[in-house]
Amino acid sequence: MRKRSIFYLTIKLLFLVLLVSCSGKGKKSISIFETTDVHGVILPYDFIEKKRLNAPWPHHLTILSRSERIKMLQCFLINGDNLQGQPEVYYYNFIDTLRPHFIAEVMNYMEYDACTVGNHDIEAGHRVYDRLVKEYNFHCLAQML
């Protein structure tokens, strides 16, 4: 119950800060970029279908570059489904559990601000999901509830 109260208080404070920051003169904007249903497609190759991919996740780096984020306030939200899909995700979920998960390393490198949880993120089980959340340099909204 206490965590939920803190979560709602945080949301209210963020809304208040947003309202106050937009009350001044001049145009202000917030850009929200969302990537969803990534399903472990990090590398430019689909290991299941055995074919090259034209739009793997790192291609977003050109769009979501740090210099662009500095120009305007931006928030990147992952809409889950990161922990299931490609064999390399399975490898880090269940085989190589000692080194940092490569999904967390990529998301931290891309400097995501927050994420939500998709159904495929919890299907791997608490051990896998909790490990990944600990490795993120940002918060998952499910942690705040």
Image (cartoon, rainbow, N blue to C red):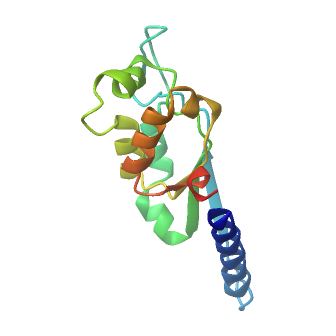
Q: Residue at x 42, y 31 (%)?
A: 42
Q: Please identify the quadrant where the C terminus is shown.
A: bottom right
> Picture coordinates of residue 66 (x, y %)?
42, 60
> Picture coordinates of residue 133 (x, y %)?
45, 47
Viewer-side residue, 119 vs 32: 119
Q: Is residue 4 above or below residue 108?
A: below
Which residue in the rendered view is the most extreme toward the left? 99
- In this rendering, would 7 be left or right of 67? right
- In this rendering, would 143 be left or right of 27? left
Viewer-side residue, 70 vs 20: 20
**Quarter of the image where one finds residue 96:** top left
Q: Is residue 42 above or below residue 79?
A: above
Which residue in the rendered view is the most extreme toward the front? 1
Viewer-side residue, 93 vs 38: 93
> Picture coordinates of residue 78 (x, y %)?
57, 45
- In this rendering, would 23 be left or right of 129? right
Q: Residue at x 40, y 37 (%)?
A: 103
> Picture coordinates of residue 43 (x, y %)?
39, 27
Q: Residue at x 60, y 54 (%)?
A: 141
- Please give the count of numbered marks on the rendered protein: 0
Q: Residue at x 57, y 70 (%)?
A: 73
Q: Is residue 84 above or below residue 112?
A: above
Q: Please identify the quadrant where the N terminus is shown.
A: bottom right
